[in-house]
Image (cartoon, rainbow, N blue to C red):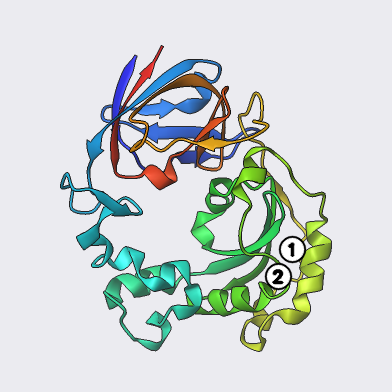
Amino acid sequence: MQYQAVLKKMMTELNDVVHYYLDTENDFLNLNQLLNKEIEISFEGYQCLSCGKEKKIFRQGLCYDCFYKSAAVGDWVMKPELSTAHLGIEDRDLAYEKEAQLKPHIVYLALSSNVKVGVTRKTQIPTRWIDQGATKAIEIVEVPNRYLAGITEVALKEHVADKTNWQKMLKNEILDIDLIEEREKLKAFIPKEAQPYFLANNGKITEINYPVLQYPTKVKSLNLEKTPSYFGKLIGVKGQYLLFEDNTVFNIRNSEGYKVIIEVK
């Protein structure tokens, strides 16, 4: 069967094993059902996810013009501590920024290779953890806006990593770490403004299993601009990556806005 799509982040559903769905032109493709099947991915061009024009993608599925205009990709997205909507100060679009920033946010610990600290809107749990390929995660604080989450993350990343080693994550090389113990160690470093929001009674660890038949021993990334046609057997999906039998990995998230044809053999 053949599917046409403008690539977007895979949708996920947390069950005993994560279920992955790819939005295609006429349907949602359940990627779990494609495990152990041969797939051909053909690169057909670009389509900006904001303006819809067939313009070369610059970053995050957007063309150059949209990337520097869209309120959805302001600096506060990657650096929550730069959020200013709580002060009534606009970055690009105050109404949008209030809607996004003035919502409950969670600062968490996730285990994907090493343990890392991160920030997400409360409504994005557990989606954010799945997208990072975390096998376990636990919440630390729940704050009323993105700024407080951001300054908490900045303080905590002095004591714990804030990045995932994506190659180790894909090879399933994961450290054995007690997240509850790590959370207690970090409690003392939470900024004064966020201390009242510490989730004192939260000892719940979320465990996440991925649909992977076999993990790669090494990884080589598929770049559709350099390799516009790729053929391989799908053996797993983890984070936002497709894993293939020949150790090729394809980051769907990094290829947003790419027009492709996916053929299942």
Tell me if residue 253 comes above or below residue 248 in the rendering. Answer: below
Could you tell me which quadrant the C terminus lies in?
top left
Q: Residue furthest left?
A: 53
Q: In the figure, residue 258 lies in which quadrant?
A: top left
- The Cα atoms of the two marked residues, 1 and 2, are separated by 5 Å
**Residue drawn at the location 64% of the way across and 48% of the way down:** 134
Percent across and percent down for residue 183 are 77, 66
Crowding at label 1, few (<14), some or many (≥20) Cα neighbours within 10 Å? Answer: few
Tell me if residue 161 comes above or below residue 93 in the rendering. Answer: above
- Is any atom of residue 145 visible in this view? no
Mark seen at residue 202: 1
- Residue 206 versus residue 249: which sits nearer the camera? 249
Q: Secondary structure at mark 1?
A: loop
**Residue drawn at the location 46% of the way across and 67% of the way down:** 78
Could you tell me which quadrant the N terminus lies in?
top left
- Is any atom of residue 125 visible in this view? yes
Q: In the figure, residue 216 lies in which quadrant?
A: top right
Residue bearing the label numbered 2? 199
Percent across and percent down for residue 232 are 48, 20
Q: Residue furthest top?
A: 265
